[in-house]
Image (cartoon, helix red, strand yellow):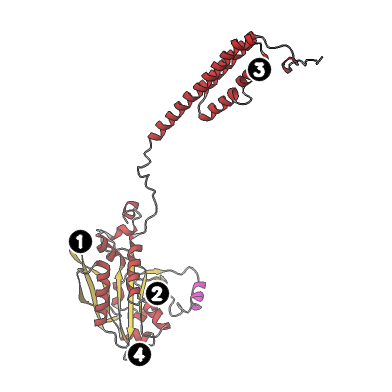
Amino acid sequence: MVERRPHKANVAGSIPAVGTMKDRIQEIKKLAMEMAEKAKSLKELENLEVKFLGRKGELTQVLRSLKDLSIEARREIGPLAQQLKKEIEELVVEKAKEFQAMGSKIESKFDITKPGNKIHIGHIHPLNIVEKQIRDIFLSMNFSVVEGPEIENDYYNFDALNVPKDHPAREAWDTFWIKRQSANSKAQSANDSRLALSDKLLLRTHTSPMQIHYMKTHQPPFQIIVPGRTYRYEATDASHETTFNQIEGLMVGEDVSLVNFKFIIEKFLKKMFGEDVEFDFRPSYYPFVEPGLDVYMKWRGKELEVAGAGMVHPEVFRAVGYDPYKVQGFAFGFGLERLAAIKYKIPDIRLFNSGDLRFIKQF
């Protein structure tokens, strides 16, 4: 006769009593409801489902143990366990819908089709914008761009430009002179070929000294512009500043005349301001040109000088070793701030150095 092995559920003891199984089901139900109530996310709901309905879940173990019960016990405990499984599944689904609805409400506060907040970025200063435009225009007319030092000596700033020492013409430029700090500075400047001609240093009052620097190291023909900052010790107003920018221009050759100058300036202003730009030339005096003239434009209902110009003075050519009987040329110096003020209809050039971001952000 075959010996019947005891069911493995009896290995650790007798078959669980029906009352004990009912208590277990009620305990699982209570715990599941509490966890569902406390759940704050879909992840916590997922953990609840795994804990009770997963492969090793607590209610799953109860359902698997039904096979160890008698037929009568199965009929009594089975429906209770199946009903609880259904309730937990429905509870998880309903709770998940609540979380999804809450998420939709949160998302509904944001219109994904609405433009985002504007990111504040830096702005290019209007003077930089205008200077680049000027550079591009003159480069298109075959001019070269040259830059020079802001600290000069009185030879390059005055003497070589036909403004002799103690000449009344020097009073037209209110100069920032630089004081020497030690006796060694004099010896140091003597070793500097650029400053060796003079011991008196200054902040350049115009960009014209670069005419001398360039002509001393180059032979004509050539045509250059020199953008740069300049300094003058004078009272400020809507059209004057103690520090401002100039665009120096110089063209030298055998047959350069005022006709060439007029053509270049007219071409430049039309490219800068449009074909209908209004400007005129007026006679003027500068010690480094002969004849001299100014360029005027309309600004705030009045005539404003935007450039000083003229044919290079023969003495300037002699200072750099050129023969004034063989070469001639013209020079001009535009005020960058004044051109920008006219172009953008700015009422006061002091705004350019104000540091006011409300002004800069307009560009």
Residue type of the residue flagged with mark 3: Ser
Mark 2 packing: few (<14 Cα in 10 Å), some, or many (20+)? some
SS at circle 2: loop
Mark 4 / mark 1, whichever is N-terminal: 1
In this rendered view, identify the residue nearer to me: 243 or 135: 135
**Closer to the observer: label 3 or label 1?**
3
Quarter of the image that includes the C terminus: bottom left
Mark 1 packing: few (<14 Cα in 10 Å), some, or many (20+)? few
Q: Is residue 318 magenta?
A: no
In this rendered view, identify the residue nearer to me: 183 or 161: 161
Measure the alpha-carbon separation of dots 4 and 1. 44 Å
**Closer to the observer: label 4 or label 2?**
2
Measure the alpha-carbon separation of dots 4 and 2. 23 Å
Count of number-bearing discs: 4
What's the residue at 42%, 72% (across, down)? 149
**Closer to the observer: label 3 or label 2?**
3
Would you name the residue on which mark 2 appears? 146
x and y percentages locating residue 101 in the rendered image: 42, 29
Measure the alpha-carbon separation of dots 4 and 3. 118 Å
SS at circle 1: loop
**Magenta-highlighted residues:** 183-190
Residue type of the residue flagged with mark 1: Arg
Answer above or below: position of 126 versus 188: above
Mark 4 / mark 2, whichever is N-terminal: 2
Answer above or below: position of 149 versus 341: below
- Magenta: predominant secondary structure element? helix
Residue type of the residue flagged with mark 4: Asp
In this view of the protein, can residue 215 be seen by the observer?
yes
Would you name the residue on which mark 3 appears? 65
Tag of residue 300: 1
